[in-house]
């Protein structure tokens, strides 16, 4: 395992971990969601499943999150997360263990970033697993009430408690929503012809099953949609993580081995 620090196009520090690089197997990149980090239990679970199946795995902290990379969470945008994904893949492409096509896995905001990348470079992506993914900025906005949106825009900040880091209050600028509205997977969804795995929690309120069905119905290639009973947006309970592992493992074995 290698823990490294590289710089992105803005000369900011990105922390990443490469595992299994001594293998000759396929490659996967695993990306967290908004405010997430590379050590979250659901990220670790997905990394472990890919490693168990002989993959080389790269996971990283984007900038503007709560991991080890540079920037501040309040400045987080879909654009900056997507650019960091591009920059990590660009860095990896110069390493001796790099292989194409590779697998992309992302949760939530990381999900839409990996899917956007797959739409832009479909020939590079062997399989895509956008879990609890953002489908579009418009759908994201629809989960907030008019009052919540008005307050966020008026104050310039949305302040919420972190569930992954107890005691932390997350502050996110209104510019995040303005930026997010620029993104939508559906106009170019026909480019996603690689095998796709969608997984969402039954009780996900951020990227609910109804949003995932819209994306699933639009996909033309090999596709799966699984709803984990009783699970919220971020999988933390052991039973939900075990189900996540089982589903990802079965999918890998179907399409990568």
Image: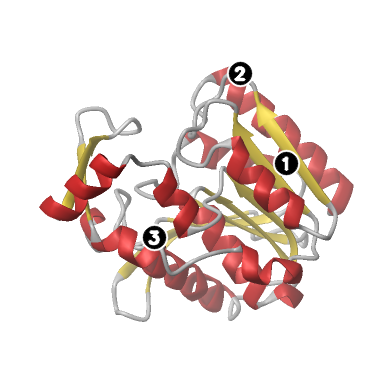
Q: How crowded is the residue under tag 1: few (<14 C-alpha within 10 Å), some, or many (20+)?
A: few
Q: Nearer the viewer, residue 100 or 112?
A: 112
Query: Which mark identifies residue 230?
Result: none
Q: Is residue 80 left or right of residue 240?
A: left
| Quadrant of the image occupied by residue 208 | top right
Closer to the observer: label 1 or label 2?
A: 2
Q: Nearer the viewer, residue 8 or 72?
A: 72
Q: Is residue 66 left or right of residue 203?
A: left
Check disc 1 and report the residue beneath it.
Answer: 52
CA–CA distance between discs 1 and 2? 19 Å
**In terms of sequence position, does the residue under pointer 1 or pointer 3 come before the other?**
1
Q: How crowded is the residue under tag 2: few (<14 C-alpha within 10 Å), some, or many (20+)?
A: some
Which element carries disc 1, helix, strand or loop? helix
**In terms of sequence position, does the residue under pointer 1 or pointer 2 come before the other?**
1
Q: Nearer the viewer, residue 24 or 160?
A: 160
Q: Nearer the viewer, residue 40 or 197?
A: 197
The reply to whether residue 47 is in sight is no
Q: Position of residue 101 (x, y in %)?
A: 75, 70
Which element carries disc 2, helix, strand or loop? helix
**In terms of sequence position, does the residue under pointer 2 or pointer 3 come before the other?**
3
| Residues marked 2 and 3 touching at CB (< 8 Å) | no
Q: Residue at x 52, y 51 (%)?
A: 134
CA–CA distance between discs 1 and 3? 25 Å
| Residues marked 1 and 3 touching at CB (< 8 Å) | no
The reply to whether residue 40 is in sight is yes
| Quadrant of the image occupied by residue 244 | top right
Which element carries disc 3, helix, strand or loop? loop
Check disc 3 and report the residue beneath it.
Answer: 62
Check disc 2 and report the residue beneath it.
Answer: 239
Q: Is residue 50 above or below residue 156?
A: above
The count of marks equals: 3
Q: Is residue 28 above or below residue 118?
A: above
């Amino acid at each position: 395992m290698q823990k490294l620090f590289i710089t992105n196009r803005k000369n900011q520090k990105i922390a990443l971990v490469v595992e299994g690089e001594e293998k000759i197997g396929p490659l996967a990149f695993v990306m967290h969601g908004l405010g997430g980090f590379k050590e979250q239990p659901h990220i670790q679970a997905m990394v472990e499943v890919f490693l168990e199946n002989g993959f080389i795995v790269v996971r990283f902290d984007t900038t503007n999150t709560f991991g080890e990379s540079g920037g501040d969470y309040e400045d987080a945008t879909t654009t900056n997360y997507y650019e960091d994904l591009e920059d990590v893949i660009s860095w990896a492409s110069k390493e001796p263990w790099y292989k194409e096509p590779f697998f992309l896995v992302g949760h939530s905001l990381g999900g839409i970033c990996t899917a956007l990348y797959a739409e832009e470079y479909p020939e590079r992506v062997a399989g895509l697993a956008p879990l609890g993914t953002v489908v579009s900025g418009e759908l994201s906005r629809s989960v907030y009430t008019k009052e919540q949106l008005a307050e966020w825009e008026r104050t310039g900040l949305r302040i919420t408690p972190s569930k992954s880091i107890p005691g932390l209050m997350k502050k996110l600028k209104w510019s995040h929503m303005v930026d997010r509205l620029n993104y939508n997977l559906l106009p170019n969804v026909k480019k996603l012809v690689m095998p796709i795995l969608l997984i969402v929690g039954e009780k996900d309120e951020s990227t609910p099953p109804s949003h995932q069905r819209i994306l699933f119905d639009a996909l033309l290639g090999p596709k799966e949609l699984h709803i984990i009973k009783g699970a919220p947006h971020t999988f933390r309970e052991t039973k939900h993580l075990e189900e996540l592992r089982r589903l990802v493992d079965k999918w890998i074995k179907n399409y990568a081995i």
